[in-house]
Amino acid sequence: MTEETIPRLFGTNGIRGVPNEDLTPEFAMEIGMAIGTFVKDKVAISMDNRLSGPMLLNAVKSGILATGCDVINIGILPTPGAQYYCKSRNIFGVMITASHNPPRFNGIKCIDPDGTELARRKEVEIEKIHFKRDFHIASWEFIGRETSDNSAFDLYTNAIISRVDRKKIQDKKFRVAFDAGNGAAYLTTPEILTRLKCNLTTLNANPDGLFTSRPSEPKPENLKKLVALMKTGDFDIGIAHDGDADRVVFIDETGNFIDGDTTLTLFSKVFLKRGDVVVTPVSSSNAIDIVAKANGAKVVRTKVGAPIVSRAMIENNAFIGGEENGGFIYGKHQYCRDGAMAVALMLELMAREEKPVSEIIASVPRFYIIRESVKYNGNWNAVMDQIRNKLKNWTFDLTDGIKAIRDDDWVLVRPSGTEPIIRIFGQSESMERAFDLADDIKSMIQSE
Ligand code: MG
């Protein structure tokens, strides 16, 4: 097998699959052996609360132990909780999670000792070891040892509380509705909210690997119960994570959904000072550019993907970054998406502004982004040429796929890395215009 023919296992967020179909315990054990062979050191292991978590965690663990590496089991945690542990202890980590995917999925994700998602070049090394079956198998007396450490929960929740003005938030006694969606933050986020003296009402705060309460992607259509609760007028803010709680969305006190793009814009507006840098992919809205410019700060645009944003934040010494899907990264805490960190910052901001959330949000510019996808098997270069011809007087940005820009309108068109699909984003000041922009390109590709 030559270097070029090594198949790819890790996607943008680890290895995903359906347990006992493509993600079998045998496969997971071999991935563990490849990880142990690569790391040659202690590995922290954690999982979210998916049904197949224990099966996969134990298989990966067994593989790691076989290579002679010790394993520290840190228990069920949100992904950013496991990442914070790795960073604090300077230790490699493995997280068993499928984030926001439907309950039948699960995944294996590696964490660098600095707490960030593993760099692609290191994943390639692990893939090579796996496919060449180049495992280091320890003789019996050198097999790894397992310990467990339950300190990650306090380490993580204490760290988040320490990053905000605790007193200021506590004085407000905010009335908060939190929909845990049966996910991994069912204990951590309530702990943080309680210690910040919020008057807390929880929904679905029981761990349930079948996600019986709601799908784990925090989209408006999945958060109807929370929205209904907010509409009673009894709460200052509503909060919902995805399954592994690296993302968060908010609902204002009147029941309006606040998407990740708006949250990132708001945080940029409030926290960025002259000379600061905010990092975000080409897929988030121009609102971030407007508020950054007003503060004298700079925007660095990257390809789509949270690990890419994290790396660019480190390179540019940026402490704010994130994605339009609710993935917010606060570099003063850690360089990875962290839902609960964004919650604490939002509460601090509410305490500082002394206004209802809807009024705070009304102060930030907003654009509409419509997302579409279309099946496509043809030649990507031909699609690029068509777009260039169709949108003749627009300017083009090739950071990721092709982004055609004119004033405050843009269309971003990117081929998926894993499926025969082209993703289309349209942004404009009006929803109709954004929809038209995306739809025109979709029809053009479909009529090919
Ligand atoms: Mg996630």
Image (spheres, helix red, strand yellow):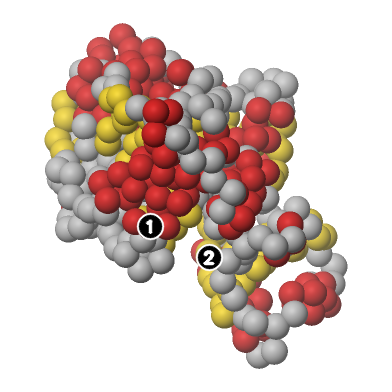
Which of the 4 quarters of the picture holds residue 378?
bottom right
Q: CA distance from mark 1 to mark 2?
A: 38 Å
Residue drawn at x 31%, y 34% as measured from the top left: 77
Q: Secondary structure at mark 1?
A: helix
Mark 1 vs mark 2: give the one in front. Answer: 1
Q: Position of residue 195 (x, y in %)?
A: 23, 17
The dot on residue 112 is none
Q: Is residue 382 left or right of residue 26?
A: right
Q: Position of residue 431 (x, y in %)?
A: 52, 64
Residue drawn at x 27%, y 36% as measured from the top left: 76
Tell me the kind of residue under disc 1.
Glu
Quadrant containing the N terminus is bottom right
Question: With respect to residue 418, does 400 lie above or below?
Answer: above
The number of discs equals: 2
Farthest top residue in view: 167
Out of 118 and 155, give the one closest to the viewer. 118
Q: What is the crowding at mark 1: few (fewer than 14 residues within 10 Å), some, or many (at least 20)?
A: some
Residue drawn at x 41%, y 24% as measured from the top left: 85
Out of 74 and 263, give the one closest to the viewer. 74
Q: Position of residue 277 (x, y in %)?
A: 68, 28
Q: Is residue 34 shown to the viewer in this render?
A: yes
Residue denoted by label 1 = 26
Q: Secondary structure at mark 2?
A: strand
Residue denoted by label 2 = 371
Q: Is residue 192 left or right of residue 280?
A: left
Question: With respect to residue 176, does 218 lie above or below?
Answer: below
Q: Is residue 236 shown to the viewer in this render?
A: no
Tell me the kind of residue under disc 2.
Arg
Which of the 4 quarters of the picture holds residue 232?
top left
